[in-house]
Image: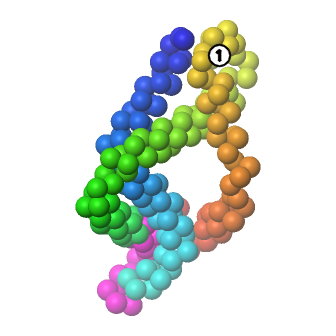
Amino acid sequence: MNYIDLIIAIPLVWGVFVGFKNGLIIEVASLAALLLGIFGAIHFSDLTANFLVTSLNVTTQYINLIAFAVTFVGIVILVHLLAKMIDKLVKAVALGFVNRLLGMVFGLIKYAFIISIILVIINAINRNKTFISEEKIENSILYKPLSAFAPGIFPYLDFQEIKKDIKDFKDDKSIPL
C-alpha cells in the first residue's frame, strides 16, 4: 500500500460514511435527482420557457437558459422532497438500519465510480508515466481495480440517446451558451 492507495481510500471511506449517514433512499435520490433534472431540463425546459413568457411576461434573450435552470432546480427539489417522504416512511416501519447499510454500499459504489472516472482521465494524461510512475501504479492495491471499474460498467449503459439529447440541446441556436 502506498500514497496512491491512501489518496484513493480517503474518498472511498467518505463515501461509505456519507452513504451510511444518508441511507440508500437519500443516496439514490441524490443521484436520480441529478440525472432526472438534466433529462427533464433538456426535454421540458421549452414548456417552462413558454410559461415564463406567457404567464409572467418574462422576456430576455436568456429565456431558454433561465427555463433550463428553473426546470432543473424544480425537478431536483421535487425528487428530494419525495425522497425525504419515502425516507421517513422507511424509518417509521423500522427499516432505518437496513436503509443505512444499503446506503453505505451504494455510497461506496458511487464514490468508486467517480474515482474510477478520474483515474481513467489520469491514465489518459499519464501515458508516458511522467505523472505517476509505473512502479507506483504496480505497487498500488486500489489503482488498477478502480481504473477498470467504470470502463467495465460502460458497456452496460446505453449512452446513445443521452448523447443525442445533449447534442440536440447544444445545437439549439436559441440558447445563448
Q: Main secondary structure of the magenta part?
A: helix
The colouring scheme, among rainbow, by chain, secondary structure or one colour, is rainbow
Residue at image coords 31%, 51%: 96
Local crowd size for mark 1, using a 10 Å CA cut-off: few (<14), some (14–19), many (≥20): some
**In the figure, is residue 162 to the left or right of 84?**
right
The kind of residue on which mark 1 rests is: Ile
**In the figure, is residue 119 to the left or right of 84?**
right
Residue at image coords 45%, 85%: 50
Q: Does the magenta run of residues contain 134?
A: no
Residue where numbered disc 1 is placed: 137
Residue 174 or 46: which is nearer the viewer? 46
Image quarter in which the N terminus is found: top right
Residue 49 or 59: which is nearer the viewer? 49
**Picture coordinates of residue 126, whole percent (x, y):** 67, 23
- Give the magenta range: 53-73
Residue at image coords 68%, 55%: 157
- Looking at the rendered structure, the secondary structure element under dot 1 is helix
Residue 24 appears anywhere in the view: yes
Residue 136 or 19: which is nearer the viewer? 19
**In the figure, is residue 154 to the left or right of 64?**
right
Q: Does the magenta run of residues contain 55?
A: yes
**Picture coordinates of residue 159, whole percent (x, y):** 69, 58
**Picture coordinates of residue 26, whole percent (x, y):** 37, 54
Residue 30 appears anywhere in the view: no
- From what the image shows, is residue 144 above or below residue 44? above
**Picture coordinates of residue 63, whole percent (x, y):** 43, 75
Residue at image coords 31%, 43%: 21
Q: Where on the picture, by quarter, is residue 101?
A: top left
- From what the image shows, is residue 122 above or below residue 4? below
Q: Where on the picture, by quarter, is residue 54?
A: bottom left
Q: Where on the picture, by quarter, is residue 11?
A: top left
- From what the image shows, is residue 31 above or below residue 9? below
